[in-house]
């Protein structure tokens, strides 16, 4: 659907430009935008390489392991049904740490592995009643938490602002921390409320 919408908007723009005699401006704009896209990819690629390398250094130095242990109470609060030694805890912690640092590209692999581990846990827990296309409470909670994503260093936004000539590229840090802190708090409250309602309904049914 999105591909169709983008194609339709591009087609309408070209036809409108042709009818108004502005095809030259459209062509120049397309070429200029293509050049900007390449420059932006190079800029963000450098930032990505730097922070991904920092994550690898932190993991080799044991910092990630230490942060994961410190996050255990928070993970246990949000995901009480996940066993303590389950691998999903590690991947969830890595995903949250990468999100906090603003490394959206680095948190994706950990997020996918966390979802796979949670799906495997749900399959084992449900047994014959397992439904492959049904997300568990833990999967929904993780998805909502991942979307809200508290960020201390919005690396992507800083790179974009610097690329387009912002006088203070890092000026977005404070508003980003405030906005993502609120979104994360709302996400946590929402997940806990829904989880309690789900537990209550299950208890009523079993009774």
Image (cartoon, grey):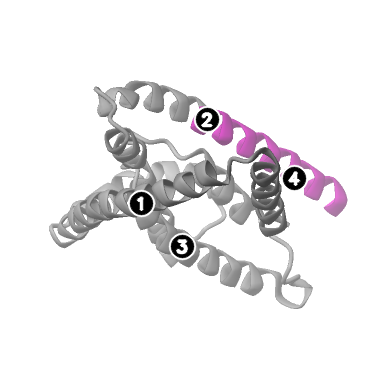
Query: Which segment is the magenta one?
Result: 183-207
Residue 196 in picture, x, y percent from top left: 69, 39
- First in sequence, mark 3 or 4: give its number: 3
Of 9 and 170, the residue lying toward us: 9
Name the side, left or right, on which 113 lies relative to 189: left
Residue at 42% over, 66% down? 87
Q: Mark 4 points at which residue?
A: 198
Q: Residue 35 carries which label?
A: 1
Which of pointers 2 and 4 indicates the residue nearer the eye?
A: 2
Is label 1 in contact with label 3 (beta carbons under 8 Å)?
no
Q: Which of marks 2 and 3 is in front?
A: 2
Q: Please give the name of the residue rendered at 73% of the width and 63% of the height, measured from the top-left corner.
A: 134
Q: Is mark 3 on a helix, strand or loop?
A: helix
Q: Do the residues labelled 2 and 3 touch (CB within 8 Å)?
A: no
Mark positioned earlier in the residue sequence (4 or 1): 1
Numbered disc in front, either 2 or 1? 1
Which residue is under mark 2? Answer: 183
Q: Residue furthest front?
A: 21
Was residue 28 drawn as part of the magenta stretch in this picture? no
């Amino acid at each position: 659907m999105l591909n169709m919408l983008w194609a339709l908007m591009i087609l309408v723009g070209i036809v409108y430009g042709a009818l108004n005699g502005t095809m030259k401006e459209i062509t120049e704009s397309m070429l200029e935008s293509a050049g900007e896209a390449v420059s932006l990819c190079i800029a963000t690629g450098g930032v990505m390489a730097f922070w991904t390398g920092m994550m690898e250094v932190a993991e080799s130095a044991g910092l990630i392991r230490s942060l994961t242990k410190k996050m255990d109470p928070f993970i246990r609060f949000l995901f009480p049904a996940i066993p303590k030694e389950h691998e999903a805890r590690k991947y969830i912690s890595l995903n949250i740490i990468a999100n906090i640092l603003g490394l959206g590209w680095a948190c994706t692999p950990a997020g996918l592995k966390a979802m796979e581990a949670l799906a495997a846990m749900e399959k084992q827990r449900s047994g014959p009643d397992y439904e492959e296309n049904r997300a568990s409470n833990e999967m929904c909670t993780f998805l909502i938490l991942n979307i809200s994503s508290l960020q201390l260093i919005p690396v992507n936004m800083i790179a974009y602002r610097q690329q387009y000539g912002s006088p203070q590229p890092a000026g977005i840090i404070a508003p980003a921390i405030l906005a993502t802190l609120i979104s994360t708090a709302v996400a946590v409250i929402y997940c806990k409320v829904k989880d309690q309602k789900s537990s209550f309904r299950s208890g009523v049914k079993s009774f």
